[in-house]
Image (cartoon, rainbow, N blue to C red):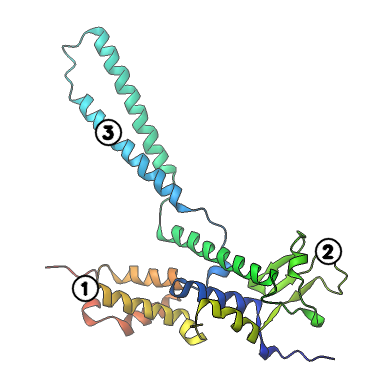
Amino acid sequence: MLQFDITQYYSLFEVFERTGQLMFRDLWTGREIWSKPADDPNPVAVERDTLGKTLATALALQTQLNSIPQEHLTHEAKNNFNSDYAINYAEIDGLKRRLTELPQMSDSYIADFELFSRRVSVEQELWKAFTDKSLTAQLRSNVLADWRSWSHYPSFKVHYCLSMIIVPHHQIIAFRRSPAFVDKKAFLQWAERFGSGIYDDEQYAPKQRARSWLLEQVDKSGSKPYGKSRFIEEMVLKFGTPKREANRVWQEVVPQSWSKPGPVRKK
C-alpha cells in the first residue's frame, strides 16, 4: 500500500494562494479566495460622471432662466417660459435623484471588485493547468482528479478555500468529496512560468505586507498626506491586518513628524 507523505504536497488552498502571489505580487492580499462576485465599478463611475456634467448644464440653464425678467413678457412668452422652467426643474430633480441612487464609489467597493477579479484570474489559470495536466490533484485512495473529463459535468465542483473537490455523480468512485493536494515539485516546476519569488509565510503575513506598504507611503509622500486613522483603515482593507496590528505597524514605521494628529500642514 502506498504511503501518502503530506509534507511533499501543497493543499489546493496553498496552490491557489501561491499562484495568486506569483501572478499579482504586491497586489495580492490573501483575501481573494474568500471574495464574492462584485460588479465592475467602472460603468457606475462613467454614469456618475455623465450625470454630473448633465446636471451642471441643467443648473446653468436654471440660473440663466432665473435671470430673465418676466414683467414685460407677453402671455404666450410667459407660458413658454414657465414650460421651459418646469421641464428644466424636473430634469434637475431627476438627475439629483439618480445620482443619489447610484452606489457610492468607495475604496471598499472598488477593492471588492478587484479582489474578485484576481480570484477569477487565478482560478482560470489553475483550471487550465489541471485540464492540460500540467498539474494533477491527488485525492483520497490515491485517486487522481480527471479534470478534463470531469469538467464536462455540472456536479464537478472545486472549492479552493476548503481544499476540496466534489467528484461528478456518474463516477464509480467510493467517495464523492475529497481533500485535494498537488505535488510540491510539480507545482514549483509549473510555477516557474511566473518567475521566482514565492513569498514565504513571514513575508506574506498581513502585518509584514502592511509594513512594506506603509514604508513605501512614507518614502513616497515625505510629509503626511492625511490622518493616521485613514492609514489604519487602508491597512485593514488592503491587507486584512487586524486593527491592533495596524496601529503597532504605524508606531514602528512612521517618523516623528507623522506622529502628530492630522495631516501635516504645508507652509
User: Could you say whether the residue bearing mark 2 is in a helix, strand or loop?
Assistant: loop
Give the residue drawn at x 37%, y 72%. 232
**Which residue was labeled with disc 2?**
169
Q: Give the residue type that dot 3 points to.
A: Leu
Q: Could you tell me how far apart the alpha carbons at marks 2 and 3 are, in whole angstroms?
A: 63 Å
Q: Which of pointers 1 and 2 indicates the residue nearer the eye?
A: 2
Residue 206 vs residue 35: left or right?
left
Residue 244 vs residue 75: left or right?
right
**Crowdedness of circle 3 by 10 Å Cα count: few (<14), some, many (20+)?**
some
Do we see residue 240 in this rendering?
no
Residue 90 spot, x, y in % from top left: 36, 27
Residue 165 vs 207, above or below: the answer is: above
Q: Could you tell me how far apart the alpha carbons at marks 1 and 2 are, in whole angstroms?
A: 61 Å
Residue ranking furthest to the left: 267
Q: Give the residue type that dot 2 points to.
A: His
Residue 74 vs 88, above or below: the answer is: above
**Crowdedness of circle 2 by 10 Å Cα count: few (<14), some, many (20+)?**
few
Disc sitting over residue 223 in the figure: 1
**Crowdedness of circle 1 by 10 Å Cα count: few (<14), some, many (20+)?**
some
**Which residue was labeled with disc 3?**
59
Residue 14 spot, x, y in % from top left: 60, 79
Q: Could you tell me how far apart the alpha carbons at marks 3 and 1 are, in whole angstroms?
A: 39 Å
